[in-house]
Image (cartoon, grey):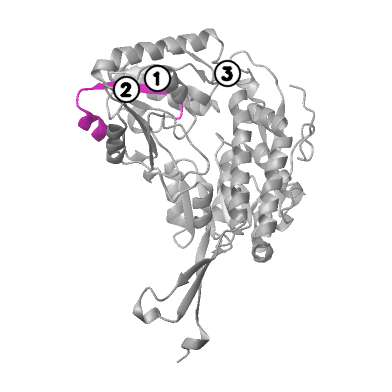
Amino acid sequence: MELDKKLYLPGFPGTSPFPFLSRGVWKSGQVSREYAHFSSRLPVPGGKDRWRVFEAGIPELEEVLQGSGESRKIMRSLTRARRSRVLENVARLLEEFRDPLTIMMVQEVGKPLSAARFEVDRAMTTFRTAAHLAADFGTRWMPGDSVPQGTGMTGLVDRVPRGVVLAITPYNFPLNLLAHKVAPAIAAGCPVIVKPAPFGSLTALALGSILLEAGLPPEAISVLPADVPGTLHMVDHAEVDVVSFTGSDAVGWSIRERAPRKTVLLELGGNAGVLVCDDARMDGLPEKLVTGSFAYAGQVCISVQRILVHRTRFEQLLDGMVRRVQQLEKECAIGDPGNENALMGPLIHGKQADKVWDRVGQALRGGAESVTPLRREGDLIHPVILVNTKEEDEVEKEEIFGPVVTITPFDGVAEAVARINRSRYGLQSGVFTDHLERGLELAGAIDCGGVFVNEIPTFRLDHWPYGGVKDSGFGSEGVSYAMEEMSRPKLLGFRTRKNLG
């Protein structure tokens, strides 16, 4: 794809190491880390491009953190109209640079081309939603005379920013998951420090450059690739007021333990379960479940991982899903993420591919069977559909984060719901039935942050609440919900003159 537009990121797509963004200023560090073009990880390697990104060390991080007082004052002074205008400008610039951002995500994290394009579109929606909400976010009138002792009193409850937001983001949605932290923070009046995933740093830096171009005060935004000690230094620092983390449950809960006096928002893992009832409509369902299981090689927190299907529909669903996988293989939808019709490519790196492959092997040794050919080419693992798995198998009980799904028949729906609920995760689930009342009843019985009836749990709208229970997280995302989390109520109570007594 020939690009008409060039991103503002200094040096892109030319020389590296690329600088980081320190309170609106592009800077170099003492250490840089090397990354390879994603095509180098294909079975038949493509481009051999490599680039480096400077990391911020403790001195560079401390410089940003020590400026937090000024950053807070600047953001609190911005009118709602100004915040809204900045956010709308970001959405406009994302639309303008849709093509280069799409290509950047394909090259950097192996996002399939159509999925990367859709992610840019979602990020536009996220910022536009925040722009709309920022315009009238805050004050609520509360009369006091709802209780006898409140007669003559009036309360005004405003929402004031909590302060500096540290946004720690993963690689799998390097633009829109970052948007879900940055846009609400700006709308609520908070400055932001971004610590992007190592894979995904360029996309985060590109968004930083767009934020500056959109008119955000430079002191309000930093994008700081950092190592683990540097990240923990920021988490622990007194100048950070909110930590918003998306990633593994182990890391997320350890962050919450380290920061008991901060507001900590956690969007963590899942092993999404889907319940297919005996009255579910089967037209198109196998294809939908294959997409939910294998899109972006299953590297999605709400990827379909466990399918529980009534025994009367088991063979039909299984056969349909196997046929769909075979069709995708023939269409070359599995392999190069740069293909227009790609559904999935390789996993993010060899370590993750090894982990997924080992877990599949563990299940097979325990008696599970794969109904699709087991095929691995380097970091590319072709879709795996497993039957005869056990609840204690890691492919069921842990977040697999790979192209693997289990299918298990059930006889009684109560036991199927119980099996879903026995998981330590509770992010999103799905129920398929031809009777809405039944679907709503089952959805109410499933212990998850979100349950969809006649839709896969991979579905998400960016203005809806999003967050898990149990080990899947703490707090809520979704623009308006994150704005509430990143702000606090402040009461102004007053007595009218005629009631002074």
Q: Is residue 30 visible?
A: no
Foreground pick, 422 / 117: 117
Marks 3 and 1, how far apart in space? 20 Å
Q: Amino acid at mark 2?
A: Ala
Residue 204's image quarter? Answer: top right
Q: Which residue is mark 2?
A: 280
Query: Which circle marks residue 262 in the picture?
Result: none
Describe the element under mark 2 as helix, strand or loop: loop
Foreground pick, 172 / 375: 172
Q: Residue at x 19, y 27 (%)?
A: 412
State the quadrant of the N terminus: top right
| Of pointers 2 and 1, the one earlier in the residue sequence | 2
Residues drawn in magenta: 401-421
| Of pointers 3 and 1, the one earlier in the residue sequence | 1
Percent x, y of residue 254: 44, 50
Q: Which residue is mark 3?
A: 342
Q: Which residue is mark 1?
A: 285
Percent x, y of residue 83: 67, 56
Residue 384's image quarter? Answer: top left
Percent x, y of residue 115: 58, 27
State the quadrant of the C terminus: bottom left
Marks 2 and 1, how far apart in space? 9 Å
Q: Amino acid at mark 1?
A: Leu
